Image: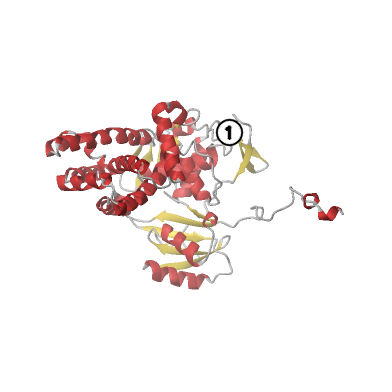
Amino acid sequence: MASVDENLTPTAEEQLDFDPTMKKKKKKSKAVSFTPDELDDAVPHEETPDPEVDELTDMFAGLKKKKKKSTSSAPLEPADDEPAADAGAEDNIEDFDFGSQKKKKKKKVADVSAFEQQLEEAGVNEEEEVGEDDETFEKPEAEEEGEGEEEEAGWLNSDREYTYEELLHRFFKILRTNNPELAGERGQRYKIPPPSVMREGNKKTIFANLKDISDRMHRPYEHVMQFLFAELGTSGSVDGNSRLVIKGRFQQKQLENVLRRYIMEYVTCKTCKSISTHLAKENRLYFLVCESCGSRRSVSGIKTGFQAHIGKRKKMVG
Amino acid sequence: MSTSIENLKTFDPFADTGDDDSQPTNYIHIRIQQRNGRKTLTTVQGLPVEYDQKRILRALKKDFACNGTIVKDDELGEVIQLQGDQRVKVMEFLSTQLNILKKNIKIHGF
């Protein structure tokens, strides 16, 4: 796993200039280069009842559980009062789906654990890996999850005391397999189409479906636009086909993040998490009124804040 | 006699406990701006006035190995500008070195 992390970090750093196709290629090539030895190494690790290894794997399990909890079981958990607003925000953000992300993960777990079994049974052969191209590039993350699953069986057999985390995890797992509708997200999922982003020339980005997205959120697109500009610290305009032209280079992922934050702040009801809300303006203050539960909360206006002077200095006065 | 009974002590459940966020929180905003090419600029706005901005800047510059300045803005006071995307690092610095609560720091940008 460590090697995967190492490989991932540089791409994260180069976020600014990365291009999705590049990333995929990288991942794929890495996955293919998984040597059979590595795989063999990983498999026995999970099954040996060595006390030392057990401890290690336990730690791993803890890690994984955290990860998982935040993704799949978050909506059902009792909302803990986190003082850090950020942490809470992240939890909530997970509820929103820009299409396909979450599903991918679930699917991955399923087919990769199957895949691993196949590998074990058939004795690892390269052809399989190459043949199942679709899976290979999803592999690194998925394998982690598969491991977690197997470890679970490990702690069940040992006679130490089960931790709450493990039991909770087990509960959710069983619940998910037996009646998925209970484990699923409450109510309907809110789907917002992923922002379609293109480059115009070298310095401008086109955000084509802003109108669509803001309609979906029941917000005037001017408001969304204002927020985007304030957050990104740039300016821009709307062109003839009601597409948004943003100055500066932005990737779809980045805009997605900003949109998520917008939804968190200005669209979801904090009480019932619904997005059927509207913004009401009352003597200069904006209130977010929920249409499904009727709660109101005040939201701060969009402030651009400090804007540094960029570019030529001749305009500066005094 | 009544004083000896524990349960009869007056307790006002609606009393102000003092730990709510009623006082206006001054957020520290950390923003990012794109410059030419892949260069960026990080601005830190709203640092508490009791801290010496110059010293903070000096520490930041040394820690992150980047240049930076203090810009005086008419409305917003002094703003620290740093070269490059230092948002997360600034956040770490502020929360560990200056004991500023993370919930009072807002990171903007993508």
Query: Element at badge 1?
Result: strand
Give left or right: position of A15 versus A239.
left
Residue A96 vs residue A278, the one in the foreground: A96
The count of marks equals 1
Q: Is residue B8 visible?
A: yes
Asked if residue A16 is positioned above or below residue A278 in the image, the reply reads below
- Depth check, front residue: A275 or A278: A275
User: Which residue is farthest front?
Assistant: A159
The residue drawn where x is 63% and y is 32% is A294
The x and y percentages for residue A204 are: 35, 45
Q: Chain of mark 1?
A: A
Q: Is residue B95 left or right of residue B23?
A: left
x, y percent for residue B15: 74, 51
Percent from the top left, x then y, of residue A275?
53, 33
Which residue in the rendered view is the most extreme toward the right? Answer: B1
Q: Quadrant of residue A107?
A: top left
Q: Position of residue A143 (x, y in %)?
A: 27, 42
Front-lying residue, B85 or A90? A90
Amino acid at dot 1: His
Write the residue at 61% across / 31% down: A293
Count neighbours of disc 1 (C-alpha within 10 A) and say few if under 14, some if 14 to 19, many if 20 or more: some
* Residue A309 seen from this side: no
Residue of label 1: A278
Q: A295 or B54: which is nearer to us?
A: A295
Q: Say how the picture is coloured.
A: secondary structure
A177 over B51 or under it: above or below: above
